[in-house]
Amino acid sequence: MLTWQSDLYALGVAAMDAAHAEFCRLVDAASRASDEDFPYLLHALIEHTRGHFDHEERLMRECGFPALAEHASEHRRVLGELLHMANAVEEGRLRFARLYVSQGLPAWFRNHLATMDAALAASLKREATRAPADDTLPVS
Ligand SMILES: [Fe+2]
Ligand SMILES: [Fe+2]
């Protein structure tokens, strides 16, 4: 189970927090779904995750984030796992995919949030509070 808790999970960057709250909502919905509804909700989770990861990678490029390659590679790995689970469902291995979504994915999310996403949010907040270069001083 994964329930969004802003006191635990909010990083202070509104767009990232909104994406993470939606991620939690979709993981929770898929975890609670009937076997019949699970495949559809897994696809919704995969679509959200693609957008969520693309958005973070765009933020990293825009702020020149030094660990972009490492963070993006972790995103690719997890997206690959999710696609592997969608294949597993098509092959009838529903229990395997359900265990991943209800246990493996929440554990991954908490760790990724506290490490890579937290580092990105800290970098974005530093960037936002940095004083603009003062080019108004008269040239003497
Ligand atoms: Fe994230
Ligand atoms: Fe991330």
Image (cartoon, rainbow, N blue to C red):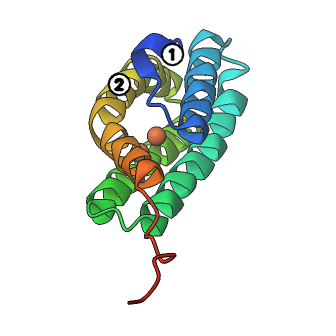
The answer to whether marks 1 and 2 mark residues whose Cβ atoms lie closer than 8 Å is no
Residue where numbered disc 2 is placed: 110
Q: What amino acid type should be assigned to the residue bearing mark 1?
A: Ser
Give the vertical position of 64 relative to 3 (above or below).
below
Question: Of helix, strand and loop, which one carries label 1?
Answer: helix
Which of the two discs, 1 and 2, labels the residue nearer the N terminus?
1
Q: Position of residue 61 (x, y in %)?
A: 45, 68
Residue 69: which disc?
Answer: none
Give the vertical position of 133 relative to 138 (above or below).
above
Considering depth in this image, is 56 or 139 the residue closer to the camera?
A: 139
Considering depth in this image, is 81 or 135 the residue closer to the camera?
A: 135
Give the vertical position of 34 relative to 19 (above or below).
above
Q: Crowding at label 2, few (<14), some or many (≥20) Cα neighbours within 10 Å?
A: some
Label 1 or label 2, whichever lies nearer to me, is 1
Considering depth in this image, is 91 or 42 the residue closer to the camera?
A: 42
Q: Crowding at label 1, few (<14), some or many (≥20) Cα neighbours within 10 Å?
A: few
Residue 6: which disc?
Answer: 1
Q: Quadrant of ligand 2?
A: top left
Classify residue 27 as left or right of residue 84.
right
The residue lying at 47 percent from left, 82 percent from top is 138
Image quarter of residue 54: bottom right
Question: Of helix, strand and loop, which one carries label 2?
Answer: helix
> What distance separates the C-alpha of mark 1 from that of mark 2?
13 Å
Q: What amino acid type should be assigned to the residue bearing mark 2?
A: Arg
